Image: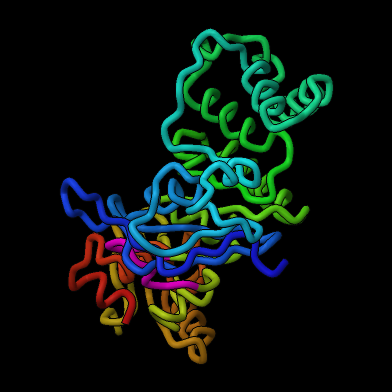
Amino acid sequence: MEHICVVEGLCKTYGATGVVANRDLNLRVSPGEVLGLFGPNGAGKTTLVRQIMGLLRPTSGSISILGHDVVRNPGAAPVYAAYHAQRQVMLASYRATEVLVQAGVLRGMRTANAVSQARTLLERFGLAARSGSLMLRLSGGERQMVFLLSTFMGHRPLVILDEPTSNLDPVRRRLVWDFLLERAHEGIAIILVTHNVAEADQAVHRAIVVNRGTVVADGTPGDLKRMVSRKIEIRVSLKPGAEWRLADTARGEPLGEGRWIIRADPEESSQVLSHIIETQGLDGIDDFAVSGVSMDAVYEALTGEWWDERHERAIN
């Protein structure tokens, strides 16, 4: 099957308030794809995924998972999809292992198989020593990891994760990104809802940006960057006490104490970098990096978040 999940012409209006959460929204996700869903608070991301999971009924439009109409039959959604909600029930009296095993059993696993898979997942993420601990006794990050791992118990062709790494430390966040890409390689389709634009570069194959309830951009992270700007960014950090010596400072913008950013067309980036090194001297440069436009700038440009003249200069 070409697509695991297809959303077409989706509209959701909350009757009591008249608030339009989704407006003519279209989305497709394929097997083996990690699809990032980005957008500011109130953009309609969580409303969208709750409709995919059959937890909210659309005002109009269609949603199918593996060809099954989940608008007409919401009960089909959890048969084919697993969902990690942004807010989780505490389950204070459950132990970490029990949360995973129960999730697996509810999805049709034999208890012995669920216990084995739970042990493997907890060991992989450094939680084996906490497997017998009550959820109440775990840290916030540990609880989030347990709930996230429970989403992958059993096998569902579609997995939807709403802000799964928000409380995780950088090490565990990186482990989660690698884990998602591995699961996708096995053929699972993953929808990753997040505010963390770094995840667009690290963990998604395709990114959709939602703003005011509708899709404003859809493409690979590279596609989205090129939509906003084709310029190359050169970031330079000076050593303490070193001065910025470039005469053409109009091309450089200070980012803070001893840090500068220079933007150049791709064809002249090598020449600009050589000029910076020759002018500043390697003795005065602590570090530098060359990249395309940042995903932060892409996010700001496409959603209008924190938009001002400085950001407009940054992407043009």
From the top left corner, tell me how far across and down residue 51 is, in percent. 44, 50
Question: Which one is nearer the viewer's eye here, 68 or 156?
Answer: 68
Q: Residue furthest front?
A: 72
Q: Residue furthest left?
A: 17
Question: Which one is nearer the viewer's eye here, 91 or 273?
Answer: 91
Residue 261 against residue 274 in the figure, above or below? above
Q: Which residue lies at the image location 26% right of the left edge and 55% below the top edge? A: 13
Quadrant placement of the C terminus: bottom left
> Which region of the structure is painted magenta?
209-218
Q: Quadrant of residue 81?
A: top right
From the top left corner, tell me how far across and down residue 275 is, in percent. 46, 83
Does residue 18 appear in the picture of this structure? yes
Quadrant placement of the N terminus: bottom right
Q: Quadrant of residue 303?
A: bottom left
254 in magenta: no
Residue 202 against residue 150 in the figure, above or below? below
Q: Which residue lies at the image location 71% right of the left edge and 25% below the top edge? A: 105
Query: Relative to residue 208, is residue 102 drawn left or right?
Result: right
Does residue 241 appear in the picture of this structure? no
The chief SS type of the magenta part is strand
Residue 53 against residue 138 in the figure, above or below? below
Q: Quadrant of residue 233?
A: bottom left
Q: Which residue lies at the image location 70% right of the left edge and 53% below the top edge? A: 188
Q: Which residue lies at the image location 66% right of the left edge and 58% below the top edge? A: 66
From the top left corner, tell me how far across and down residue 78 is, in percent. 59, 41
